[in-house]
Image (cartoon, grey):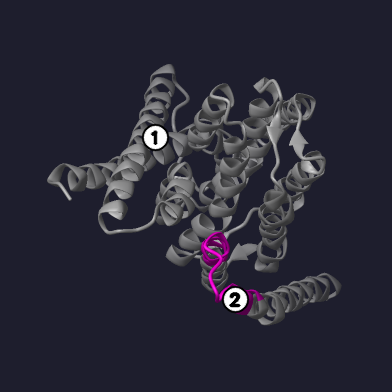
Amino acid sequence: MSLSVILLLIGGLVLLVVGAELLVRGASNIAAMLRIPSLLVGLTIVAYGTSSPEMAVSIQSSFAGQANVALGNVVGSNIFNILIILGISALIAPLMVASQLIRLDVPIMIGVSILTLIFGSDGIISPVDGTILFIGAIVYTLFLIYEAKKQKDEESAENSSHTSIENSPKNWLINIALIALGLVLLIQGSNWLVESSITIAKALGVSDLVIGLTIVAAGTSLPELASSVVASIKGERDIAVGNVVGSNIFNILAVLGLSSAISPDGIPVATAALNFDIPVMIAVAISCFPIFYSGKSIARWEGILFLAYYVAYSSYLILDSSQHSQLPWFNFVMISFVIPITILTLIVTTVRTYQAKRKRLNS
């Protein structure tokens, strides 16, 4: 293992941290200048910007005749975004969840996840399907812009945690430059980190399978991870949560949609993806609703739950791909105990929250 690889790894981490810091600072300043909730900035500027690696990988794969890579990239990134990014961010500090996410954006994320399964049920996401998805991305973005204008009033300014910043051309140029530079550093940092991590993993004797299921799969989500963690540390929790939800919606509607639309034969959907990976993506999206709804927050124990499920998901992929002898036992434990207990806990928590809210309204 050469010194250059280690320096590349350290350099990648540094660029990720610095890039995330610049992106979050620029985005939160723009929210203050426009006097709009930082959640909307997280759902748009930060979410779309940090999803640019997924867009680049998926479009490049479509032009290279490897359109099936686009689907795995989107599905894997969406699972990683919720389970790992929200999990780590909630461990740093419990995340408050805005009412808009529960009322609107999480249901949209669930809906487009289910739509992916419906479109792929015939074994392919056709160019027509992709066009429909991409039109959905445009409509959703226009709706967010409309929401931003509607909330740009005195009430939203009073509820904002930001100090007012002068809305001047100079400040606009500075903060746009911060966002652009932050995105460049995030993308370059993630590239360096993935490249050096693969080299180190191979030097340690880790198989290509494990590398592909872990380092490469998570690589395009590193900008989202860095941005949400930095936002959580800085107290910009709306950006931390909005970034994840907005990225997941953007990944399906824009990334998968555009990749399918420009691919002449569309994107093939493997049986394994239909039977396991896409349903997992849907289940993870659905799990956000009761967790977000209970107390309008993501508690630390819920962050641990997210992280534990990502470990379980990765373990299943590795065991299944290698046809490990422990796979049947692993499946039995997950299906018979872990998943039912988790579902029961979420149902009980949601019901209790609902009853508490009704009691407050009636009192």
Q: Is residue 142 visible?
A: yes
Q: Is the magenta stretch mostly helix, strand or loop?
A: helix
166 falls in the magenta region: no
Amino acid at the residue labelled 2: Phe
Q: Give the residues in magenta.
A: 313-331
Percent of width and height locating residue 108: 75, 45
Residue 84 vertical placement versus 254 (above, below): below
Above or below for 307 versus 110: below
Label 2 residue SS: helix
Q: Of residues 202 and 13, which is closer to you in this image?
A: 202
Residue shown at the point (70%, 75%) measured from the top left: 335
Q: Name the residue under label 1.
A: 187
Q: Do the residues labelled 1 and 2 touch (CB within 8 Å)?
A: no
Quadrant of the frame with the C terminus: bottom right
335 with respect to 330 (left or right): right
- Residue 134 appears in which quarter of the rendering? top right
Amino acid identity at mark 1: Ile
Residue underneath mark 2: 330
For the residues labelled 1 and 2, the Cα–Cα distance comes to 36 Å
- Residue 142 location in percent, x, y? 71, 27
Instruction: Return the x and y of residue 299 as percentages of the image width and height.
Output: 56, 69
Question: Within 10 Å of the Cα at label 2, are there few (<14), some (14-19), or many (20+) other Cα atoms?
Answer: some
